[in-house]
Image (cartoon, rainbow, N blue to C red):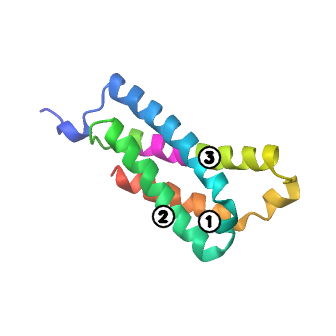
């Protein structure tokens, strides 16, 4: 019994997924940093999570030839976490953020949670 081609994931596909997730995570993290003043409000934080999760999930899906499955969902969620870490790193390095600001970043945490679910859902 052969598996469905959509869920048949080889090592090369996993490599492309990792590269797509890494590139999308860095690009989305930089974009998130640039638009950070707009995402400080709760409503815009939710919209940010929806948009960035969809973007990362779609880029991983395109990079793997529209494959799907749990390993690709995990890589897309990893790309979302990478985007959040890139954003926070840039805020610490280029802005005047301190550790106390990170603990109060509720909009960012809500956005990264929503983005993770959306990115994983794109690869279901």
As drawn, which residue projects farthest toward the left?
1
Q: Which mark is residue 110?
A: 1
Depth order, front residue of 30/117: 30
Q: Position of residue 29 (x, y in %)?
A: 60, 47
Q: Main secondary structure of the magenta part?
A: helix
Q: Whole-Å distance between the Cαs marked 2 and 3?
A: 17 Å
**Can you tell which quarter of the image residue 78 is in?**
top right
Q: Position of residue 51 (x, y in %)?
A: 47, 61
Q: Is residue 78 visible?
A: no
Q: Which mark is residue 50?
A: 2
Q: Is residue 51 visible?
A: yes
Q: Nearer the viewer, mark 2 or mark 3?
A: 3
Side (left or right) of 40 relative to 80: right
Q: Nearer the viewer, mark 1 or mark 3?
A: 3
Q: Are marks 2 and 1 in contact (CB under 8 Å)?
A: no
Judging by the rendered image, the residue that carries numbered circle 3 is 30
Q: Position of residue 81 (x, y in %)?
A: 59, 47
Extent of the magenta region? 73-80
């Amino acid at each position: 019994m052969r598996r469905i081609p959509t869920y048949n994931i080889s090592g090369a596909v996993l490599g492309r997924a990792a590269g797509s997730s890494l590139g999308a995570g860095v690009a989305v993290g930089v974009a998130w940093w640039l638009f950070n003043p707009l995402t400080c409000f709760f409503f815009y934080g939710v919209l940010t999570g929806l948009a960035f999760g969809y973007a990362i999930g779609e880029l991983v899906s395109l990079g793997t030839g529209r494959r799907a499955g749990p390993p690709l969902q995990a890589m897309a969620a990893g790309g979302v976490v990478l985007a959040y870490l890139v954003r926070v790193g840039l805020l610490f390095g280029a802005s005047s953020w301190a550790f106390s600001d990170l603990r109060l970043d509720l909009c960012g945490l809500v956005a990264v949670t929503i983005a993770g679910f959306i990115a994983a859902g794109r690869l279901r």
